[in-house]
């Protein structure tokens, strides 16, 4: 199974990486975060329907699921699982307004 990471999700990963790198001055945590995202996506690819289903008013997100990033459980990967592909929509920290952010996705 293949996967794609939408540009907004890439931006989310970079934002969180920079937060650990610059905001907390913890480069080892920043690198560990990126590695954890990659491991978590690999896990999702093995069991794409394993994530918790989410429901939003945004119809383009029908079937959206989420899975916590390993070791960074406050950050979740929001994705759509299709027959042969997983599309990573966003990677968001739980303190953000998840509903508002995802309802604006296209």
Image (cartoon, grey):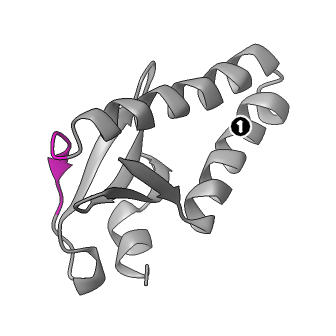
Residue at the spot 80% in from the left edge and 30% down from the top edge: 21
The question of residue 52 being in magenta is answered with yes
The x, y position of residue 4, in whole percent, is 50, 58
Displayed quadrant of residue 106: bottom left
> What span is colored magenta in the figure?
49-54
- Residue wearing tag 1: 17
Displayed quadrant of residue 16: top right
Q: Is residue 89 visible?
A: yes
Q: Is residue 96 visible?
A: no
**Residue located farthest toward the top when viewing the structure as drawn:** 28
Identify which residue, 85 or 44, lies in the foreground. 85
Left or right for 66, reference 26: left
The question of residue 92 being in magenta is answered with no
Residue at the spot 21% in from the left edge and 73% down from the top edge: 56
Displayed quadrant of residue 20: top right
Callout 1: SS = helix
Q: Main secondary structure of the magenta part?
A: loop
The x, y position of residue 86, in whole percent, is 36, 55
The x, y position of residue 88, in whole percent, is 44, 56
Query: Is the residue marked by circle 1 packed among few (<14), some (14-19), or many (20+) residues within 10 Å?
Result: many
Number of dots carrying numbers: 1
Residue at the spot 32% in from the left edge and 38% down from the top edge: 44
Left or right for 83, reference 102: left
Left or right for 102, reference 21: left
* Above or below, comparing residue 62 to residue 80 in the picture: below
* Above or below, comparing residue 84 to residue 49 in the picture: below
The x, y position of residue 5, in whole percent, is 54, 57
């Amino acid at each position: 199974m293949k996967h794609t990471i939408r540009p907004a999700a890439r931006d989310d990963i970079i934002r969180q990486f920079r937060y650990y790198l610059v905001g907390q001055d913890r480069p080892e945590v920043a690198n560990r975060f990126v590695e954890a995202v990659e491991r978590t996506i690999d896990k999702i690819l093995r069991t794409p329907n394993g994530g918790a289903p989410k429901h939003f008013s945004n119809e383009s997100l029908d079937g959206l699921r989420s899975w916590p990033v390993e070791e960074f459980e406050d950050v979740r990967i929001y994705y759509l699982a299709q027959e042969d592909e997983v599309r990573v929509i966003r990677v968001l920290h739980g303190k953000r307004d998840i509903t508002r952010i995802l309802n604006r996705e296209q």
